[in-house]
Amino acid sequence: QSGRRLCVAFLTVTSVPALGQASALDPAGAEASSIATLFWAMVVGGALLWLFVVSLMLYGIRRRRRVHDEWTAGRLIFWAGAVFPVVTLFLLLGYALWLMPQLRPWAPAQAAATLRIEVEGRQFWWRAVYHRPGDQPVVTANEIRLPVGERVEFTLTSSDVIHSFWIPPLGGKMDMIPGRTNRLSILATKPGTFRGPCAEFCGASHALMAFSAISMEPEAFRSWLAAEAGPARPQPSDGARLFVENGCGACHTIRGTAASGEVGPDLTHVGSRLMIGAGTLPNTEEAIARFIAEPDVVKPGSTMPPFRMLPETEIRAMAAYLKALQ
Ligand code: CUA
């Protein structure tokens, strides 16, 4: 019984269906494919080497009384026990070194013509800014979409502690270091929805710092980005009024309204995202209401203050307002 419970708990922790698959061994991008190939080359190479050396050792133990010829024994140890492993390990090292520059095809001249996504890690969420050549930057948060078949340049920064950017099925990972800009290039080859976890311990809610990464057909991507670039068009409602009255706009931006805070995630089109709270809860009105009421419980260490002192109806009204921001 307890074993089964442990197993269920393990599966709950390791499977994250809502945010999409997160295996580096099921690649959907050029960089992740190289990494998966390298992984299997290392596993197979290492296993063969281990099997060979262990077989040789067992052979030596069984035959130890019968090998009187010291010259033969010495030759066996030299060639099979030293030269062969060294050559195999160097071949694996050479393969890895040859692969490494291919994982960073970063060329500033070429980058000027391509889509660049600036991602900033914050405790415990992600600010994303899309820079399209010759167009206004588009600010969003906690969801990263990219076109299939087009190379995207990521510039990675942090405003507080070290985080790490990783979309296992697409590419990465790369640390996000305060005061530094790191670069990463990703080419998605298949459409899909993936989970991007923070891969560097960064505080109490490190495990709750994730984003959805969605690779889309270029046409669909462009219409999504055009919609994302536009302002929100909220209807006047109790929720909209309460959002202003409770001072939410001091921390959050909703373009098209007076809310222009920079402390928390941009909420302009929050209703269209897959998850809320940086991969913490599904994007439903109930979940948004819960996050507003008790962010300190849902996401320990988050900078958002709890609003559990407000009447339930008011929290619900604000949640409905946010969910409608498509
Ligand atoms: Cu951010 Cu761990």
Image: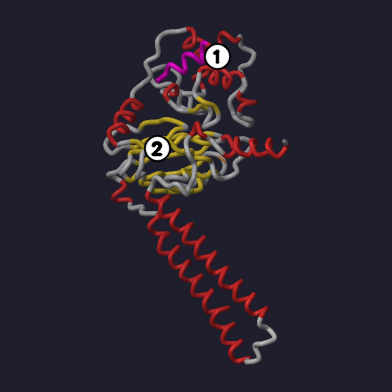
Q: Residue at x 53, y 65 (%)?
A: 46
Q: Earlier in the sequence, mark 1 or mark 2?
A: 2
Of the residues tagged 1 and 2, which is closer to the observer? 2
- In the rendered image, the quadrant that contains the N terminus is top right
- Secondary structure at badge 2 equals strand
Q: Residue at x 55, y 79 (%)?
A: 80
Q: Position of residue 39 (x, y in %)?
A: 48, 57
Which residue position is annotated with label 1?
246
Q: Position of residue 152 (x, y in %)?
A: 35, 44
Indicate which disc residue 192 carries.
Answer: 2
Q: Position of residue 81 (x, y in %)?
A: 58, 78
Q: Is residue 307 magenta?
A: no
In which of the image's four quarters is ligand 1 placed? top right
Q: Residue at x 60, y 10 (%)?
A: 312
Q: Is residue 174 above or below residue 309?
A: below
Magenta-drawn segment: 317-326
Q: Is residue 266 above or below residue 87?
A: above
Q: Is residue 166 visible?
A: yes
Q: Is residue 115 above or below residue 105?
A: above
Q: Is residue 206 visible?
A: no
Residue placed most toward the observer, 298 or 55: 55
Q: Residue at x 29, y 45 (%)?
A: 112
